[in-house]
Structures are given as structure tokens and as C-alpha cells.
Image (cartoon, rainbow, N blue to C red):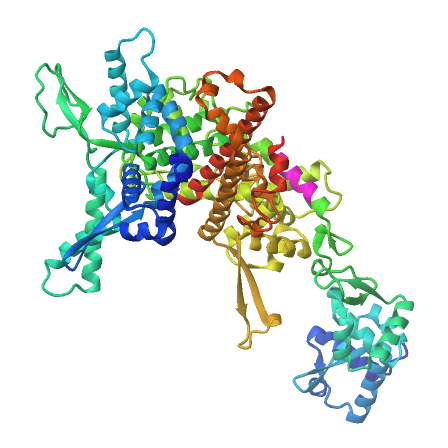
Amino acid sequence: MATNLTPLEELFYQECLKAGNNGLTYTDFSGIHPDSPVMDTAIAMNSLLGRGFIEVFQVRGEQVYKALKKEEIGKAGALQGEEQVVYNTIRASGNEGIWTKHLKSKTNLHEAVIKRCLRALEQKALVKAIKSVKHPTRKLYMLMELTPSVEVTGGPWFTDQELDVDFVEQLTNQCYKYILMKSFPRDASCIFTSTHSAYPSAAMVRKYIMDKRISQVDLSVDDITMLLDVLVYDGKVERFIALVDEDWDDEDMDTDSDWVYKAVRDKKAESAWQDCPCGVCPVADFCTEGGPVNPAGCNYYNKWLDF
Amino acid sequence: MEYIHFSLNMYQKVANVLIRKGRMPVGLIVNFTALKPRQVRECLFVLIQHNLVVYAESQEKSRIVTYYEINRTELLHRVLIPKVLHSSQEWFERDGALIAESLLTHGKLTITDCVADVLTTSGVAPGKTTTQRTQLLNKAFTRMVKEKCLIAVRPSDSLTAADKDMAEEKRETDKMTLPPTAAELASIRKVLGAQKQAEQNSTIVGLKRRLDTMDDSYGEKRPRLLTDGDLVIIEEVETDVYFKVNFERFIIRWRNVQIANLYEARLNPTAKTIMQTIMNLAEERMINCKEEHSSPVSIMLLLNSLPKDTNLIDTLEFDPSDLGPNNTKPKIHECLDKYIQILEEDLMKILKKDGGRSGQYVINLKSASQILKKNLIQGIVSARFGAPYVRIMNMLADKGKLEEKQISRFSMMPVKDVREKLTTLCTFGVLNLQEVPKTKERTPSRTYYLWEVILPRAADTLTDRLYHTMGNLRQRRFVERAKRAVLLNKCERTDVKADDSLLNAAEKKELETLNSVLEMLEMQELRIAEMVITLRDF
């Protein structure tokens, strides 16, 4: 490890490392090493903190010290004062990122100072700014080497923080086609008997989508389930629990859900009401006999009845 | 309505007053309409004949006052007349349609009057004697009565239903020494309701049974169609009973057809035929459209009643394991079992086993009507706004109350689109917004806004809108006719009626346009009326 540590510093650092994520209080340390003098330990701790080997937290009114990993030491250690505080706070937020406002309240630093620090950190390529799907206006900061979590990016359905409607649409159509193909026999006038068990599950749909390379992005079964739910709400497929069948034991599929899907044949969206102007009339609410809008002099009617 | 069907302004005035101002005695009607009392009495007489007005008598001090009231359901059903005629033609052939037409023009008739009327209007078909024709018509009439498409009218049917109920209730409460408690009153009402139901359910009024022998002895109450050697009991319509068209029965049948049609798109035509047959078998015991379940139908009966050309075997795709080694397809009754199983397991859950008895199936009419209503509303929303709106609606119907953000997540649509769609649907009347404040002071920022679909309420708002459209179509029809009043008057002239060469080319063309315009408007009105019965009556 770092050669320029005094024995006491080294000792304290090692103890912190051993304590791991829970951290180490001074009382803990003095319990293990009662012979180390208080003054010297304090100096050692200060020097460690200053060089970024350990960091300090306040837990229930007590100071808790945590050791940093070796690869992180250099970076934080190279930073000065406020920059270091900002860097540490950002690092603590993990792959969720942290909003500048929260950063301010956590560090108790002035806004201008935080801005300056962030600019400096960005220049050194230590942190990066990202945007969240949940709060598109907020600017979040996280460490350069981390990839943003699904919470922040919104999963595979989002490109540039916006829902990729076309992509979703295309995929749902493909899913529907696949399920439709599996739901009815080739002969259009036939139907399967009720013992038919080859209705696809979400896992099977996923396999189809991945095999056909319809999506460039890797989709999980949960993602596909979301798509299928949409199809259910569209009234295009129906979901039910599959028959329990002893032969149903495919190892290469994770069959944690027993839901299978069956397509409903597409019905044409038609309604007799919309065939006459009143069904689509934008001013129908004002339409009264003898009013400014009325059926007697209605222009829509004129057009409609004039074939 | 009266204006078209009775073409005299007088009737319109009387009916209008009654519709708008509620029940009233003759004196008041005279006041409001400014007609002569004799005219008003005549109008009321005609309207009662057509089952459109009902009356109630009440004792006021020393004299009895008669109040008149419009029979709204009967009146609203009149829009369906073209469809009734069409269906009669379909179910009872031409004779049925003629009988229905005659009954609808005269309000109510006895069998003899009706047949005589049909004979004079339609004439005797070539190659048939009048007696043969009369027999055929009698037969058709009897069949329509048996299938409850025609219903007997008793003098009491012209009394208002509410007054009849009240009078019966009073008779019961008068027996008591003390005024009835709420619980007693409720139990009386229940008993009376049950009585009424049983009455409707029992034998058909106006039918009598007769032994088909030479002597015309009237059979007493015996089981129907009892055959004993050569003795056949046939049912015939009593000649002194008046009949009218039973709109309710037509509506029930239309609903049944719609329910069966659901299965054609979901499964295949064979499934539809099976459902239709089950419905037909259960239909006899249906009384109105608000029942929860049909009466049970047994599989054996179903098998015997299926149309001969139903293809049960070839329309099923069997798993190879089901077929066995010989690859032989199962017998017809096994296939029917399979079909029933498919229908029972269908996610609409309309057909189900009758609890306790095996081989008996009932139809869940209530949920079937719900599905029909929901489909109709979905059709309207989808045709008017598009598929994404239907998605939101279905989701809310499925999940209950949801917030904007949740809707956006589940429907995979951006929040801003969802917000716009929700508002549109809400103004249209399909969605409801429920506010739930987090704190006492109800600030908008600290409030949940939950959206939901309440199906009955949505159906009500849409029915309102549909009525509005129907009114518009009808008004437009008047306008189109009024525009060409001169021409129409000319056409009514006897010499023009006799010789249409008296009309010049322009007039003929104009007449043609008018007819096609009227046809379009009437057609559209009927289609809207069909949607209304789905939402209102099913």
C-alpha cells in the first residue's frame, strides 16, 4: 500500500478497511488498540482524511470513519477541499446520480462554489452530467465510470430520455403477429381444442423476438411482459393461466410465470355513429334546434347528404 | 315521433304536452293544447289504441278523475319499427312481416281482424284460395304468439304500471290494522314482484288448447303438446283477445343474436351456431333483458336441435396426441363436448355449467350484456379517437383508479400524450376524475388525481349523445321534406299519383334526390337506435 503512511496511519486505515461498509468509530479503534495515544491518532486521522484515504460520516451523533478503495484513493486524494467534498457526495449517490439542489443541501456549500467544483471535476473527467426520465429538467451528476441505472434511463424503451414510441409500436406489432400465428390453426375456419397447450408465454415471445433479431437491445422477460400487457389493454390478446401439463418442462426457458397469451382476431374499428357527421362533430355540444349551430343548416350534413 | 307516425298536428300537440308536462286530466290538456275537448278525447283514444298513452283513475272527493300519461318505453321503441318488420320477415317469413305491419298500423287487433286486414291490404297470392291464405296467416299469427313476439293486451294494460302496483300494495296494507313498517312494506313489495314475475312466466295469455278431433271441446289446462295416440292437442289463439307487437321479445332476440355473434369473431362460425342454438333453446323462458342467467339447457337437447349442416368435426384442430394411433376423428357428440368445453373455457365466461346438474349449461346473460356494452363503447371510442384511447380505457376498466403517471407507465405512452387523451375522454364522458387530497387544505399540488371508468355512467352519457344525434337526424329529415313541400304536395295529387308523366324531368330528379336523402337519414337513425338499445335495454 501507500508507502508514505506513518505506522499509526497505516494501522488506522487497515482497521477501517476491516470494518468495511459499517465504518469505524474512534471508540471502536481505541477499544482494539488502547495503547495508541489520543493526540497521535487524531493527527493520523486528519492526515488520512486530508489525503483522501478515509472519509467521515455522522451517524447518530458519532463520527464514523470509512476506508476508501485503493483505486479511488488517488482521484479523491488529488482533489482539494470543496472539490473533494463534492466528489465524495457524488460518488456516494452511486449509479442513481445526484441532483445539483440535493448536492447543495448535502454539502452545505454555496451554489457558486458547487458550480465551480463541478466544472473543475468535469474538466478532469471525473464526473458526468446525465438526465433522468423521471425528471427531465433536472441535471444529475454521477461518476464518469458508472452506467446510469434503469431508474434513471427508463430501461430499453427510452432513447435520449424520451419514450421511443415507434420502437414500442413496432415491437408490439411483432409480438401480436407471433401470438396470432400461434393462437389459431392454419385453416382459418378451425379452432384448437381446449387441451391445446402451445399458447406462447412471455418467455417464448422474448425468445422469438431475440432469435429474429427484431430488437437491437437486449430485452428481459419483464420488458416483454410490459409489451404484452399493452396488447392486452389494446384488446388484441388475452392472458390466462396455462393448463398444468406434465410434459411442460423446458429447461432452456425460465417459466417462472404461468401466464400464456392468446390472440384475439383483429376486429375493424367501426361504429355506426361515426358514419354520420354528428358522431365526429366537434361542435355537437353547442348544437341545438334554432341555435347558431343547428341540424337544419348544418354544413357537415350538407356535405354528407350530397354524396 | 307522433308527427311522423300519425301525420296529424293534433296528435303531436297532445303527446307533446303529455311528454313535457307529465300526467294530467283532459281539462288540462285542453288548456295547454288549445284544442277542442272532443279533439283531445279523440287523440287520447287513438294514442291509447296504439299503447302510447296509459291512464289512471283516482278518487278525488266525490268524483273520479282520470289522468293520462305517456308510455315512454313504448314510445321510444317505435324508432325500432323498421327493424321489427325486418326481423319478422326473417323469422316468420312474409306473413309474419305482414301481420306485424298490420298490428303496428292499428296498435292492437284480434286475430280475425288482423288476418282480415292483411288479406285486404296484400290481397291473395295467385294460385291460392282465400281460405288457404287465411289458414296460413292464422298459423303464422299463432306461431308469433307462441314465440311471444306478439303479446295479448288486456284492458288493465292501459292503466299505468305504477298505479297498478300502488293499488295492489294498498290492498295488502289495508288488510293490516296498523300502518306497515318499512320491513313489512318491503316484504309486501317483494311478494307482489314475485307474483308479477310468476304471472309473466306462466302460460301465454290468449292461447287456448284444443283437442284436434272433430268435436270442438275445449281442453282444460293440460301439459302442452301432449300426444296420446291420435289425440293431438293443438294450441290456437283466442279470437276475442287483442294482441300487440311485443318489442321486449324482439329486443331479447336481437340481444341473443349479438351475443352469439361475439363468438364468430373470437372462435369460428360453428361456435356461433352452437351459442345461437343454446340461446334459442333458453329463449322461451326469458322475460326481459335484465335477467342474470338463462334457464339451463342440456347437451342432449342441444345436440338434437343443432342445424343439420353444422360442421362440428372438421372445424376442430386436434392435437395429435388426442387423436390416438389411428388418427381417427372423434364422433359428433364428442366434438360437441369439445366445443362446449372450449366455449366454457373462453375468457368471456358467458357459458357455464349449471351448478349441481351435469350436462346442463346456463348462459350468464348479465356479463354477456356487459361485454356487448363495453364492446360498443370501445368501438365508439376507437372510431372516434383511435386505438390508444381504447388502451387507456381498457386499462382503467381493468385496474380501477389510476394516476396519470401510472397510466403512462403501463400504457407505454409519454405523459404529455396521456394527459391530453385523458382530458379528451373525460370531456367525452367515458372517464371520471376522482380527487383525493393528501392534506386537509386540498391544495392542487398535494392532491392525487385518479382516473377511472364507470361503465354504467359512460353508457348513460353516450346514450344521451346518441339521442341528441337521433334528434338531429330527424330534424334534418323534416327540413329536407319542408324544403320540397311544393313538390311533395304535387305528388300527393290524385292525378299525379295516377300518371307520373305529369312530373317533369327536373321534378323527378328532385324527388329521387329527396328519397335517397331521406333513406340515408332514416337508415342512420335506425342504426343509432340499435346502438341505443344495446346501451339502454341490454
Q: Nearer the viewer, residue A109 or B285?
A: B285
Q: Position of residue A303 (x, y in %)?
A: 64, 36
* The N terminus of chain A sits in image quarter: bottom right
Q: In this view, does A187 lie to the left or right of A137?
A: left
Location of residue B145 with respect to A249 vertically, above or below: above
Q: Which of B401 and B162 is in front in this view?
A: B162
Q: In which quadrant of the rendered view does residue A26 lie?
A: bottom right
Q: Where is residue B35 in the image (x, y as percent from the top left)?
A: 34, 46
Does the magenta portion include A176? Answer: yes
Q: Can residue B47 be seen in this view?
A: yes
Location of residue A215 with respect to B120 vertically, above or below: below
Q: In this view, does A3 lie to the left or right of B473?
A: right
Q: Where is residue B286 in the image (x, y as percent from the top left)?
A: 30, 37
Q: Start and end of the magenta stretch?
A: A169-178
* The C terminus of chain A sits in image quarter: top right
Q: Is residue B106 left or right of residue B316?
A: left
